[in-house]
Each structure stands twice: as structure tokens, then as C-alpha cells.
């Protein structure tokens, strides 16, 4: 390791080295077992005599901080618990808003049946082909050419592949130039806020809705206004007159699950045009559709260029890759590219290159086809079980994505139910957790992305016992 020692003047050099090494060992920067540089090497680096370094090492050895083994070198000894952190006392404080923001959700460990929405099944991921392609891209030295690399909007190959992918699978109208590669939908929304909105702007969101988006908007100083949804999606007639932007999940309302009807989509676009409002479309999981006629995204119905479309690879690949994208009209290309640039220059390149290849080789389409079959079977099983075995739950019709929701009778404390289910190893979300201003009808959200089929039956039987324990005691069948 390249050990940092700095010497001042020419006095007591051995003492200075001793003090610095001792401090480094005590505060944990140097850990037990680590090798120190040989005396000759450290002396050469510090331009002092070898003997001076040896005096410091000898003293540390005598005090039990170091030990030397002939022929092997000098090593740090175990010194008991140490801690090193930034100074605890600091006059610096975050802006007030950061005291109000907490990560969502709080992932509790110990969940045996994980029905928490948002998780795909990473066991379905085609590891072998991804590993092969990724290994090839890591060797592709062209990526390291500073002249070629680092377009803030993303690797051109990937932008082309994404434009084709969303064009074919979602009928989104996009060329490669319209695509900005982001670190997930979360960053796409962050860029939209930076490029188009000002602190204090009113942003209308669905109520119930997706908490991470609301947190981001609030952290950026937006005034977030919840707008009720009904069976057709966002209630356009309830949009606040002063909204500057509307954030929606029209293909698969999060968390309720129904799509926004075509008349409602048209009404929203019409409303937005009349009031000159930005429409942000979050299309997070509708590559998975299990029936019904797909409704065109707002982006492809929009004649006015005011819809910003966001997609993600978190569900169809893996959330840990943190890859998503934004489709924007030409007037915004430069600003988005610059916003991406100032925030982190560009997304990591080897993964972008691998994903481009993965899409081009047809592997993404194949992976989606295969996992869709599996998710459809799970979707149907959850729907069947909820319908047949849970008298109190009313399913909300939905034919896409990785979760289903069901409502509970008015007045049910769904959050309490969820806490009790968690104690039994069943993880799921309550609809009330997604309330913005509310009130929101009580209910449960069943994510089936991470629960394999036989486990769905067992997990839901367990949940049924929890619910029965609350309502009327009765055996599970
Ligand atoms: C409504 C909604 N938007 C976006 C995402 C995914 O975001 P990201 O691409 O940041 O992982 C999710 C994931 O659960 C979601 O439910």
C-alpha cells in the first residue's frame, strides 16, 4: 500500500514517522495484518536515512503495534477496536428539507415470501449471456478512447438500440438522438426537474402514487400535489390549475395497477396543451403485458411535443444495473445532455455497451418473452388466489407489470395488517403507504416478481391466516 507520511523540517524525523504510523493504526486506517513498506523503500520515498525509519519501526514494534517476520516484512498487529470517521462535531447542517426525506421503502430483512412490489425475479436473468457480453465489452478498449467515449446522453449504440426497442415494443416515437441514457427512471426524473422546473413549481402526481418520485420532487423544492385516481386513472378534472408539470404512470398505475383509459389520456394531453404543462410519463414495467389491447403511451398520442417518456431496465434486466432512459423532443436535447454532463458526465460505459449488444443480439427480447410467460403464470395465480380465498379483498383489474392490487373494506387498518404479515414472514405493501394527501382506499399490493409459483401459494395461505386472525378466526384452506 502507498502509505502516506509527511515530514516537517529536519527535526525528530523518526518521532514524526512514529506518531503518524501510530495514529494510523489506532484510528483504523492501517488494519491488523497489513504490511508496511520495507524500511529501505520508505526511506527512499521520504529522502531520509534508512536508520531513521528503522528507529520508528523498532519503537512501534516494542510497543506492540508492529511485528516483523524475517524474510516476510513488517506487519500491523491487532490493537483492539478502533474507529475512524469524520470529526463528529461539525458546524455544518443540511438544509431543512433533508431532515424530512427518508429512504422508501424501509427494506426489513427476514422476509420469507417477498410480495413487495418493484422486484423482478433475478433468478430468471440470463447470467451466462450477460457475462459473455460484459466480458467482451470490458476488453473493448475503444471505450477508453477519450475522444470517442463519454457522450453525456449515452453511448450511441445503446441509444439506437433503446430507440428501436421502445419503438417496437411500446410504439414510442424516438430516434437515437431523442434518447438520454440515465441511471434509472429516478435520474431521468431528476434531469427533467433540473431542465424544466423551478423550485416552488407545483407538480401534480397521482394519489396514491410512487413515493421515490415524490421524495425527489420535494427534495428539489417542488410543491407536490396529489390528484385522485379512479378506475380510468388520473382524474384530469381534479388537476390543480397552477400545476407546471404532471407526473403519471398511465400504462400501469402505480400502485393500483389499472391503465389510464384512452379518453382520459386524451383529456390529459388536451389539458396540458391548453395550460402549457409538462407531462412526465413513467412507463416502468409494461413490457410485461398479459392480455387486453395495449393503449398507446401518452408520448405517441402527443402531437404537441410536451410529453417526456421515461423507461427503465430495472424490471426487465436487474434493478442493480441502474439503467434507464428518457425520450425527449429535439428542443430539449441540448439541455438534457448538459444536465446529464454537469451531474456526472456520463453513465458508466462498459455496461452501456453490453446492454446495447444484448439488445442488438435479440437477447433482451428473448429474455422478456421468457420471463413474461413466467410472470403471467404468477399474475394469474395471485389473481386466482386473492379472488377465491380472500373474501375481504377486491382485485383491481390489471393485465400488466409485476404487481396486482386489491382493496379492503373501508376503515381497515391496512398498515397494521402489513405489520402483522411481516411478523409472519410475508412482506407486502399497504395501499395507504402510497397516499400523497389522501384519503386512499385501504388495500394490499401483491408484487409477484420475486416469489416463485409454489411459494406464492404458501405465502398467500400464510397471509390469509393473518387476515383471518384479524377478521373472524377460521382455518386456512
Ligand atoms: C412507478 C415506478 N417508477 C419507476 C420505477 C423504477 O425506477 P428505477 O428505474 O429508478 O429503478 C419503479 C420501480 O419500482 C416504479 O414502481
Image (cartoon, helix red, strand yellow):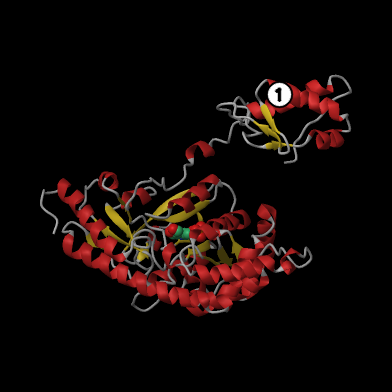
Q: Where is residue 130 in the image (x, y as percent from the top left)?
A: 55, 69
Q: Position of residue 56 (x, y in %)?
A: 77, 24
Q: Is residue 441 visible in the rendered structure shown here?
A: yes
Residue at 45% in and 61% down? 248
Q: In this view, does 432 lie above or below 326?
A: above
| Closest to the observer, 300 or 71 | 71
Residue at 64% in and 26% down? 26
Q: Position of residue 288 (x, y in %)?
A: 41, 71
Q: Is residue 245 visible in the rendered structure shown here?
A: no
- List the residue tagged with mark 1: 60
Give residue 82's quadrant in the image: top right
Q: In which quarter of the image is the N terminus?
A: top right
Q: What element carries label 1?
A: helix
Give residue 232's quadrant in the image: bottom left
| Closest to the observer, 48 or 342 | 48
| Closest to the observer, 470 or 440 | 470
Amino acid at each position: 500500500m502507498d502509505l502516506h507520511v509527511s515530514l516537517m523540517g529536519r527535526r525528530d524525523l523518526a518521532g514524526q514517522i512514529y506518531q503518524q504510523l501510530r495514529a494510523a493504526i489506532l484510528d483504523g486506517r492501517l488494519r491488523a495484518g497489513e504490511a508496511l513498506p520495507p524500511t529501505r523503500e520508505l526511506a527512499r520515498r521520504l529522502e531520509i536515512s534508512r536508520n531513521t525509519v528503522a528507529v520508528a519501526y523498532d519503537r512501534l514494534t516494542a510497543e506492540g503495534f508492529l511485528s516483523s517476520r524475517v524474510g516476510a516484512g513488517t506487519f500491523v498487529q491487532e490493537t483492539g477496536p478502533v474507529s475512524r470517521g469524520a470529526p463528529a462535531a461539525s458546524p455544518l447542517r443540511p438544509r431543512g428539507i433533508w431532515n424530512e426525506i427518508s429512504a422508501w421503502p424501509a427494506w426489513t430483512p427476514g422476509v420469507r415470501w417477498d410480495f413487495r412490489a418493484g422486484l423482478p425475479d433475478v433468478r430468471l436473468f440470463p447470467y451466462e449471456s450477460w457475462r459473455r457480453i460484459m466480458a467482451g465489452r470490458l476488453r473493448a478498449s475503444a471505450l477508453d478512447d477519450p475522444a470517442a467515449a463519454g457522450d453525456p446522453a449515452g453511448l450511441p449504440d445503446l441509444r439506437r438500440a433503446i430507440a428501436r426497442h421502445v419503438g417496437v415494443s411500446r410504439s414510442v416515437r424516438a430516434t437515437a438522438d431523442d434518447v438520454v441514457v440515465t441511471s434509472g427512471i429516478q435520474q431521468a426524473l431528476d434531469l427533467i426537474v433540473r431542465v424544466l422546473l423551478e423550485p416552488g413549481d407545483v407538480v401534480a402526481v397521482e394519489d396514491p402514487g410512487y413515493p421515490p418520485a415524490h421524495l425527489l420532487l420535494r427534495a428539489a423544492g417542488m410543491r407536490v400535489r396529489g390528484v385522485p385516481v379512479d378506475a380510468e386513472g388520473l382524474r384530469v378534472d381534479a388537476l390543480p390549475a397552477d400545476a407546471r408539470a404532471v407526473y403519471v404512470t398511465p400504462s400501469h398505475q402505480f400502485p393500483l395497477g389499472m391503465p389510464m383509459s384512452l379518453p382520459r389520456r386524451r383529456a390529459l394531453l388536451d389539458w396540458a396543451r391548453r395550460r402549457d404543462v409538462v407531462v412526465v410519463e413513467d412507463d416502468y414495467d409494461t413490457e410485461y403485458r398479459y392480455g387486453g389491447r395495449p393503449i398507446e403511451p401518452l408520448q405517441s398520442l402527443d402531437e404537441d411535443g410536451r410529453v417526456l417518456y421515461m423507461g427503465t431496465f430495472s424490471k426487465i434486466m436487474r434493478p442493480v444495473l441502474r439503467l434507464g432512459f428518457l425520450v425527449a423532443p429535439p428542443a430539449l436535447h441540448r439541455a438534457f445532455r448538459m444536465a446529464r454532463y454537469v451531474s456526472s458526465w456520463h453513465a458508466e460505459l462498459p455496461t452501456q455497451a453490453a446492454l446495447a449488444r444484448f439488445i442488438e443480439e435479440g437477447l433482451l427480447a428473448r429474455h422478456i418473452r421468457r420471463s413474461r410467460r413466467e410472470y403471467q403464470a404468477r399474475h394469474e395465480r395471485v389473481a386466482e388466489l386473492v379472488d377465491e380465498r380472500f373474501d375481504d379483498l377486491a382485485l383491481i383489474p390489471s393485465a400488466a407489470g409485476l404487481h396486482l392490487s386489491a382493496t379492503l373494506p373501508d376503515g381497515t387498518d391496512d398498515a397494521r395488517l402489513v405489520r402483522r404479515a411481516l411478523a409472519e414472514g410475508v412482506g407486502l405493501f399497504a395501499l395507504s403507504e402510497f397516499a400523497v394527501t389522501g384519503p386512499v382506499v385501504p388495500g394490499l399490493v401483491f408484487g409477484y416478481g420475486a416469489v416463485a409459483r409454489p411459494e406464492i401459494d404458501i405465502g398467500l395461505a400464510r397471509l390469509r391466516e393473518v387476515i383471518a386472525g384479524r377478521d373472524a378466526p377460521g382455518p386456512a384452506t
